[in-house]
């Protein structure tokens, strides 16, 4: 733990001289930061600490809350309606093609009603999970429940990829994705500590709150996201039960500041 604290303090000391320049660049053009990661990887806890650390360093962050959208009422109604569809999905037996379309619409509404305006105004927006994790999880669920063979599974995944919500107003330098990884043992441990609330599907397609099933299911998500990270060159940060979330948040903040510095040079 002390090593983690010393590392963060050292990073803070090295970056202090550049702080005003970084903030000035951020004021001209903000950043949309996404923390992707399998369910149970500790994203919410890390984002909470990240926002506090960033605020202390003069980089205020706006957190995306799908349950409490802040945009225009019409956008907010759409975002909440999609959340309700996902919540009642099993009861209504909603199919994964509709859920995928609905999720894409929700993310695009968030982009256009919240993210773009804040980023173009010089702010930093952070979201824990975005399209990639959602898409991967739904593809795995569809394969399990609908018993897809390899050809059907790949066809569905390719169709989903074409749905990816893309901002027409933000450039690549204004967007950054970090993959947060956690070992299966840690994900299971945190799941159990949280009361095993999040349902998953077991290998037979039955809804389960069993910790072992959760670990196996989320490992599939983690494996696919790792491939995404390799293909798209996302930085990867390990979140471990051996460290407090603030330590992991410090590593993410270091990446964000490095990104802002590199952008300042360009």
Image (cartoon, helix red, strand yellow):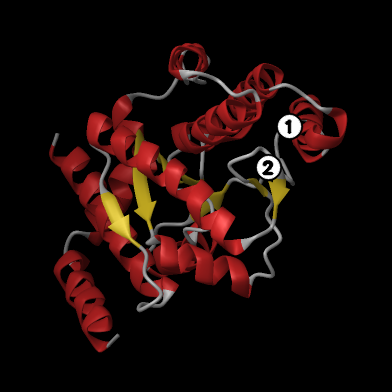
Residue 79, label in figure: 1
Could you tell me if the residues under marks 2 and 1 are in contact, i.e. CB atoms within 8 Å?
yes
* Disc 1 crowd, CA 10 A, few/some/many (<14, 14-19, 20+): many
Quarter location, residue 138? top right
Q: Quadrant of the C terminus?
A: top left
The foreground one among 41 and 213 is 213
Q: Residue at x 70, y 34 (%)?
A: 71
Q: Marks 2 and 1, how far apart in space?
A: 7 Å
> Would you name the residue on which mark 2 appears?
66
Point out residue 62 in the picture as x, y percentages from the top left corner.
54, 50
Point out residue 167 in the picture as x, y percentages from the top left corner.
47, 21
Q: Quadrant of the N terminus?
A: bottom left
Q: Residue at x 23, y 71 (%)?
A: 12
Q: Is residue 78 rendered to the left or right of residue 150?
A: right
Say if 108 sits above or below 28 in the image. above
Say if 201 sits above or below 164 in the image. below
Dot 2 lies on which element?
loop
């Amino acid at each position: 733990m002390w090593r983690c604290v010393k590392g963060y303090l050292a990073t803070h000391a090295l970056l202090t001289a550049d702080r005003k320049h970084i903030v000035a660049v951020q004021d001209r053009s903000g950043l949309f930061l996404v923390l992707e990661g399998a369910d149970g990887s500790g994203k919410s806890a890390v984002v909470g600490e990240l926002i506090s650390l960033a605020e202390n360093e003069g980089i205020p962050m706006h957190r995306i809350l799908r349950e409490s959208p802040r945009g225009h009422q019409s956008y907010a109604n759409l975002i909440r309606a999609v959340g309700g569809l996902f919540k009642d999905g099993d009861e209504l037996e909603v199919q994964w093609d509709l859920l995928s379309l609905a999720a894409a619409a929700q993310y695009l509404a968030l982009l256009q009603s919240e993210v773009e305006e804040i980023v173009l105004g010089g702010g930093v927006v952070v979201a824990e999970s975005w399209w990639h994790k959602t898409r991967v999880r739904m593809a795995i669920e569809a394969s399990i429940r609908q018993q897809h063979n390899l050809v059907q599974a790949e066809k569905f995944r390719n169709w989903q990829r074409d749905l990816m919500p893309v901002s027409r107003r933000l450039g690549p330098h204004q967007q950054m994705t970090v993959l947060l990884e956690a070992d299966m043992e840690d994900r299971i441990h945190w799941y159990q500590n949280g009361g095993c609330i999040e349902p998953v599907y077991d290998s037979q397609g039955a809804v389960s709150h069993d910790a072992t099933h959760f670990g196996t299911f989320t490992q599939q998500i983690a494996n696919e996201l790792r491939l995404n990270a390799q293909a798209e060159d996302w930085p990867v940060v390990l979140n471990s039960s051996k460290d407090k979330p603030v330590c992991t948040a410090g590593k993410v903040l270091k990446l964000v500041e490095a990104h802002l510095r590199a952008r300042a040079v360009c």
